[in-house]
Image (cartoon, helix red, strand yellow):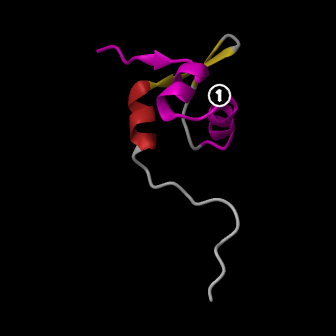
Amino acid sequence: MSETLLTTTQAAEFLGVSSSRIRQLILEDRLPAIKMGRDQLIKKGDLEKFSVLPRQRTGRPHSQK
């Protein structure tokens, strides 16, 4: 069975983020990737698993009144 491999650009479109964010996730070891030449390829199944994980909220927390 062959797994579909996506480039960082295709993965970014799939998740709705920038390709630099995909590269950052790969560097942080939060998203597995396969290095082929100068490209990094991500399995579509890994992207689907990553997309259902709860996301961390970024930025400053709201003040409590």
Q: Which residue is drawn at 51% across and 54% down?
A: 55
Expressed as whole percent of the image width and height from the top left, the position of residue 6 reads 50, 18
> Which amino acid lies under the numbered mark 1 shown in the image of this protein?
Ser
Q: In this view, does 50 lie to the left or right of 57?
A: left
- Residue 21 lies, in percent from the top left, at 66, 36
Residue 54 counted in the magenta span:
no
Left or right of residue 22, residue 1 in this image: left
* Residue 24 on the magenta span: yes
Quadrant of the snapshot with the C terminus: bottom right
- The quarter of the rendered structure image containing the N terminus is top left
Relative image position of residue 45 (x, y in whole percent): 38, 30
Please determine whether, in this image, residue 63 is positioned above or below residue 16.
below
**Which residue: 53% across, 34% down?**
16
Which one is in front, 22 or 35? Answer: 22
Q: How many marks?
A: 1
Q: Quadrant of residue 4?
A: top left
Furthest residue in direction top, as rendered: 37
Q: Is residue 54 above or below residue 3?
A: below
Looking at this rendering, what residue extends furthest in the front direction?
65
Residue 38: x and y in percent read 71, 13
Label 1 crowd bin: few (<14), some (14–19), many (20+), radius 10 Å:
some
> Which residue has dot 1 on it?
19
Residue that lies at the very extreme toward the left in this rendered image: 1
Name the element at disc 1: helix
For the point 56% across and 18% down, which residue is it?
7
Q: Residue at x 64, y 59 (%)?
A: 58
Please state the extent of the stretch shown in magenta in the rendering: 1-29
